Image: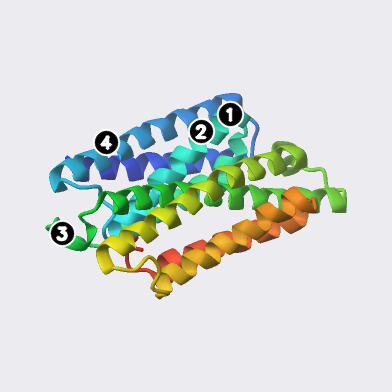
Amino acid sequence: MTHLFFILTVALYGCATAAYLACLLRTSPLLTRWAGRILAVGFTAHLLSTIHLASKMKYLPLTNMQESLSFFSLAVVGGFIFFERRYKVATLGSFIIPVALLMLIASSSLHAEVRLLPPLLQSNWFWFHALLAFASYACFTIAAGVAVMYLIQRYFLKKKHFGALFQKLPSLETMDDISYRCLTVGFPLLTVAIISGSIWSEQAMGSYWVWDHKQTWSLVIWLIYAALLHGRLTIGWRGKRAAVLSIIGFIVVLFTFLVMEHSIIW
């Protein structure tokens, strides 16, 4: 059943990706609605797949790279659906949903067996930490997608190139607002995730902070987004500078997640 839901999810995310990319080529309210509907069904199938797997394993599927990539994709799609419905920016899906699809495809290429949960992970603090970390990562992913859109739109305005793509992208003000909302949601989530991870570390290893590469890179991510939020609130960092730093932050998130980590165990 889990495999069936997973295959269905990949197919639906693939169709939704194609539909959202098609929205960049032609303006069609019907196409936009169908893209959203297909994605919603795909998200439901993904959620059911995750719930079924969790019920089979008796714990949340977050303990290896295969499970983590799939859950990361689920969090990104869920976050996108929330922000898209709030801001009515369907073209954001052209930049976000392909990323979620690639994560899911990468997850399907990995192999992981159902196994007993290691004693190290038998802590409610670990699950609390992991869920908050993924939620913050989803916010930062969406913020990075918005930042790419912002830079493209800014380039069009600078070159006075008001073509079809320019007409489909939101205004700079709307994108800046979405990016700020993602930051104000994602940063507190990351902060609490790091705190709860430290508590879990103390319970599991007897120390709140051991300066291993996992904790060090999580601190680097926190400092990047703290600088971005501080800059916006105190000296008015907006526009290109904020967009570039948001993209850099997301690159560091991916580096930490894919290169420095072999799981979401922090």
Give x and y (percent) for residue 75.
Answer: 42, 44
Q: Which mark is residue 86?
A: 1
Residue 57 visible to the viewer:
yes
* Amino acid on which disc 1 is placed: Arg
| Residue tagged 2 | 82
- Closer to the N terminus: mark 1 or mark 3? 1
17 left or right of 52?
A: right
- Closer to the N terminus: mark 1 or mark 4? 4
Q: Nearer the viewer, residue 191 or 43?
A: 191
CA distance for labels 1 and 2: 6 Å
Q: In percent of the image, x 14 and y 55: which residue is there? A: 114
Give x and y (percent) for residue 239.
Answer: 77, 51
Mark 3: secondary structure: loop
Q: Quadrant location of the N terminus?
A: top left
* Amino acid on which disc 2 is placed: Phe
Mark 3 neighbour class, 10 Å CA radius: few under 14, some 14 to 19, many 20 or more: few
Report if the CB atoms under discs 1 and 2 are less than 8 Å apart. yes
| Residue tagged 4 | 48
